[in-house]
């Protein structure tokens, strides 16, 4: 059992937080056993003035793009061709992948991210290197190799006859490992994944109850190409035809959808991975947050490294606030914290994480907040909007990583 004295900021719902300027946090057996006002007892460690918040949830991050943060070669299709595809080809070398997996996990831990939905390269061995490093470090991921077989460099084309058995093998060996690793089906996007490969991936996901994730409606030219390529009336229809739109699917970006697409998206119970910093950096546009909230669509925040420029989910929450303003919406910081933690975790199938509740698994981080920030609003402001705030510690199941 470990007893901490700290300041605590915990989401309760999308509109309510619990703020304790002086608290005890007791962790035992990897779970919170007490989170309460400080009562003068002896503690093992005094973490103040840092603020304890739940571990952050990143719903969209690319492992093989760890080394290309800041490549200013957008918009999307140019950035993929000039910066992304050349880098991802390097992950054919498992030793290189293992080396970058270490850096990637370092960056997650430093950012205070405890659960991430991760895109690999096409290479199953590279993804395996990631799983191994994640297991060694004690993080949580939902991750898979991207599925690609068309309109990309030949070295990155991996046809269904090879990709699906390789993915099945990863599922058998890694899915559910220690309750912290889930294998996902990740068709990269309609432009570089054929209908046959998307459909086969969707079937494998259904067979094993896996998450599916892909990119949707990020860039206007991408949207046009997708509709022309598949002869559909809109972009979402491509994924509907492939059997990829359902309540275990997470779609990144979702910027240029029509109201009809939003209605079908909501009816299917799919999840939005909102990646505002990436959307700004590639000039992709503004995700209409209001349309998501009106329809009660689950939303989680995504860094989208490396089109996004920071591994820090609070930095993305700050961009989500700015994006909201640009779409006529002033978001409550409580809702941003919710998306960054418990709401994001629930959207990714983990309603038990992200709340600092007694009985819950002890995933938490400390954020460097100045001691003069003493009220709930001040604490929220510093945690979410101070771009210089460091995460000074990251714990998963009570273990400091
Ligand atoms: N669309 C297809 N692939 C990618 C990617 O790697 N990043 C982003 N932002 N969009 C994509
Ligand atoms: Zn992405």
Image (cartoon, rainbow, N blue to C red):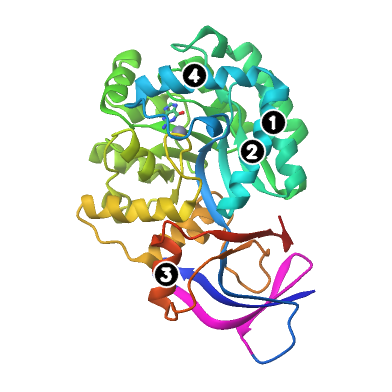
* Mark positioned earlier in the residue sequence (2 or 3): 2
C-alpha span from label 1 to label 4: 19 Å
Image x and y of residue 268, in percent: 41, 42
Residue at 66%, 29% in the rendered image: 127
Judge the density around disc 2: few (<14), some (14-19), many (≥20) Cα neighbours within 10 Å.
some
Disc 4 or disc 2, which is closer to the eye?
2
What secondary structure is marked by label 2?
helix
Q: Is residue 178 above or below residue 375?
A: above
Residue that mark 2 sits on: 103
C-alpha span from label 4 to label 2: 19 Å
Marks 3 and 4: CB-CB under 8 Å?
A: no
Q: Is residue 86 above or below residue 354?
A: above
Quadrant of the rendering where the C terminus is positioned: bottom right
C-alpha span from label 3 to label 4: 38 Å
Disc 1 or disc 3, which is closer to the eye?
1
* Mark positioned earlier in the residue sequence (1 or 4): 4
Q: Is residue 118 visible?
A: yes
Residue that mark 1 sits on: 99
Judge the density around disc 3: few (<14), some (14-19), many (≥20) Cα neighbours within 10 Å.
many
Residue at 70%, 42% in the rendered image: 134
Task: Determine the quadrant in which ligand 1 lies.
Answer: top left
Q: Is residue 119 left or right of residue 130?
A: left
Whether residue 18 appears in magenta in the rendering, the answer is: yes
Residue that mark 3 sits on: 380
Q: Is residue 176 visible?
A: no
Residue that mark 4 sits on: 85
Marks 2 and 1: CB-CB under 8 Å?
A: yes
Image x and y of residue 349, in percent: 57, 51
Q: Main secondary structure of the magenta part?
A: strand
Q: Look at the image and give the residue range highlighted in magenta.
A: 17-38
Disc 1 or disc 4, which is closer to the eye?
1
């Amino acid at each position: 059992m470990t007893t901490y004295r700290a300041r605590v900021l915990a989401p309760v719902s999308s509109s309510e937080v619990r703020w304790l300027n002086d608290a005890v946090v007791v962790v035992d057996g990897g779970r919170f056993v007490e989170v309460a006002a400080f009562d003068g007892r002896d503690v093992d460690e005094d973490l103040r003035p840092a603020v304890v918040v739940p571990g952050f949830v990143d719903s969209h991050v690319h492992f093989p793009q760890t080394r290309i943060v800041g490549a200013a070669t957008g918009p999307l299709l140019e950035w993929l061709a000039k910066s992304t595809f050349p880098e991802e080809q390097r992950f054919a070398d498992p030793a290189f992948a293992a080396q970058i997996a270490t850096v990637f996990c370092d960056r997650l831990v430093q950012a205070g991210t405890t659960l991430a939905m991760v895109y690999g390269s096409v290479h199953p061995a590279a993804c395996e290197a990631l799983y191994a490093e994640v297991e060694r470090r004690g993080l949580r991921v939902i991750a898979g190799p991207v599925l690609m077989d068309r309109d990309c460099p030949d070295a990155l084309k991996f046809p269904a006859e090879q990709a699906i058995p390789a993915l099945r093998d990863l599922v058998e060996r890694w899915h559910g490992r220690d309750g912290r690793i889930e294998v996902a089906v990740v068709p990269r996007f309609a432009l570089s994944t054929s209908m046959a490969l998307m459909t086969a991936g969707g079937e494998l996901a259904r067979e094993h109850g896996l998450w599916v994730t892909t990119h949707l409606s990020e860039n206007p030219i991408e949207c046009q190409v997708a509709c022309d390529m598949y002869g559909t009336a809109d972009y979402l229809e491509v994924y509907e035809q492939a059997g990829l739109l359902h309540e275990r699917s997470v779609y990144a970006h979702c910027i240029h959808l029509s109201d009809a697409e939003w209605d079908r998206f909501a009816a299917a119970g799919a999840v939005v991975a909102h990646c505002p910093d990436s959307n700004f950096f590639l000039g992709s546009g503004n995700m209409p947050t209001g349309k998501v909230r009106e329809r009660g669509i689950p939303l989680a925040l995504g860094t989208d490294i490396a089109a996004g420029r920071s591994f820090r989910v609070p930095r993305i929450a700050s961009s989500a606030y700015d994006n909201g303003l640009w779409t006529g919406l002033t978001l409550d910081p409580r809702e941003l914290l919710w998306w960054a933690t418990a709401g994001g975790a629930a959207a990714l199938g983990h309603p038990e994480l992200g709340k600092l509740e007694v009985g819950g698994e002890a995933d938490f981080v400390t954020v460097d907040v100045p001691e003069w920030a003493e009220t709930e609003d001040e604490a929220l402001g510093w945690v979410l909007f101070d771009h210089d705030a460091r995460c000074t510690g990251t714990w998963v199941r009570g273990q400091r990583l």
